[in-house]
Amino acid sequence: MKNSDSSRRRFLKTLALGSAAVSLSTLARCCATSAKPNILIIFADDLGFGDLGVFGHPTIATPNLDRMAAEGQKWTSFYAAASVCTPSRAGLMTGRLPVRSGMCSDKKRVLFPDSAGGLPQSEITIAEAVRQVGYKTACIGKWHLGHLPPYLPTNNGFDYYFGIPYSNDMDQIRRLSREEHTHPKVENYNVPLMRNEEIIERPADQNTITKRYTEETIKFIRENKDHPWFIYLAHSMVHIPLFASEKFRGKSPRGIFGDTVAEIDDGVGRILETLKSLHLDKNTMIVFTSDNGPWLPFREHGGSAGLLRDGKGTTWEGGMREPTIFYWPGKIKPMVVAGIGSTLDLFTTIAALTGAKVPIDRIMDSMDLGPTLFEGKPSPRDVMFYYRGQQLFAVRKGAYKAHFVTMTAYQKDNNRREHDPPLLFNLNHDPSEKYEISARHPEVIEEIRQIVKEHELNLIRGEDQLAKRINGD
């Protein structure tokens, strides 16, 4: 019966896929490639805008990512789909705002070990799209889109899965203090390490988890070097609790946080060396970004949003604007891109490069970034929606961002405030959102209000998946 259900779901998803709406430049670039390009997304957890050397951190050394940025594209206005884990990952995987899939909630911000929901089977992931055009697919690392069998990576387009199905601070043996989170012990977090649908280690030895994610990625690349492949490498770090292997522990002047970033960067270097040794480096596009901003309440154990305001959990810039690098030697035009981009755009961009199809039976929020990546043209994205749960808090149009609602996060008083007129900031002049200018630009506010009105006319909210509990509460 299970096989029958899976086959039926695959058939229905095939019907939902149509031709990819791609730019001619991207299509030409794809066709000029002798083989289908390999795709690697490296997704950090809770890494802030200011946490890489190339994005301005003075004491965190990231030589491999710095080189990728110098030889590829550094995007300085690139956004996650949400400011917390689950909805952010849903947006990346589907190319759709999480509010459409029900992968965001006003009751529970993320999925937990007692959650009964997950990514709906009706949603189509990047992995499902590229697998239909001959790609081998792997998810390595943190999933957080549902830990029950129907929601695992292997039932959402991935041939292979190795990782922790949710955040690395979950399954605590008891309620831990802040001190215990910042001086962690592996045995305090009974999180499972899975291979496909089997738990192979519990609790996962998080001291070596970053190293093992890198090794699994390299192994999959070697085993599939003769096939086009798509790998989604979603690191558990730098989400607290912070762990690093012996080689890196105590080495960074930034402390344990810097150790974990350095180990991620070292893994990037090892992957780059592997690609070069297999002569795959000129046929592989790598994207590096993060799921949301830094977890500021954990102070030095959390990251930094640099000059951006606030962090994880908020719709201020520090919550959703992420350090992002695109790298493809000989293909991507090296430059710094100030135009807007989003993890939402990875679906259509990858579909255009691989010949995969983009769903035609639903609204997609994904754009093809190919003209910017390969020709240096302005980004096609000019609008960004900032949701917190199922509520639209802010909208960016070009340089301007309007906040209809503001709210902090992870504090006793989150200071929710509604604004009419909305707060307005020019992010090109004021990325720190310090200087409110709504009184000087009523025409901008009216334009953004119209964008919101049109957006909500076509908005069908998905059933809340995050509020469903296994015990029925």
Image (tube, grey):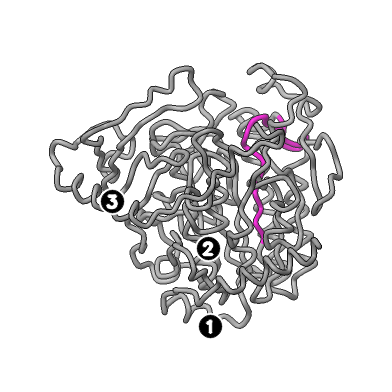
Disc 2 versus disc 1: distance between alpha carbons?
Answer: 18 Å
Q: Position of residue 106 (x, y in %)?
A: 49, 35
Looking at the rendered image, the quarter that the C terminus falls into is top right
Disc 3 element? helix
Disc 3 versus disc 1: distance between alpha carbons?
Answer: 39 Å
| Residue in the image at 75% along x and 55% along y | 161
Which residue has dot 3 on it?
A: 453
The tag on residue 31 is: 1
The tag on residue 347 is: 2
Q: Is residue 9 above or below residue 176?
A: below
Amino acid type, callout 2: Phe
Q: Position of residue 339 (x, y in %)?
A: 35, 56
Amino acid type, callout 1: Cys
| Residue in the image at 76% along x and 69% along y | 224
- Crowd rating for badge 3 (residues with CA inside 10 Å; few <14, some 14–19, many 20+): few
Q: Position of residue 27 (x, y in %)?
A: 48, 79
Horizontally, residue 126 falls left or right of residue 424, namely: right
Which stretch appears magenta? 231-249
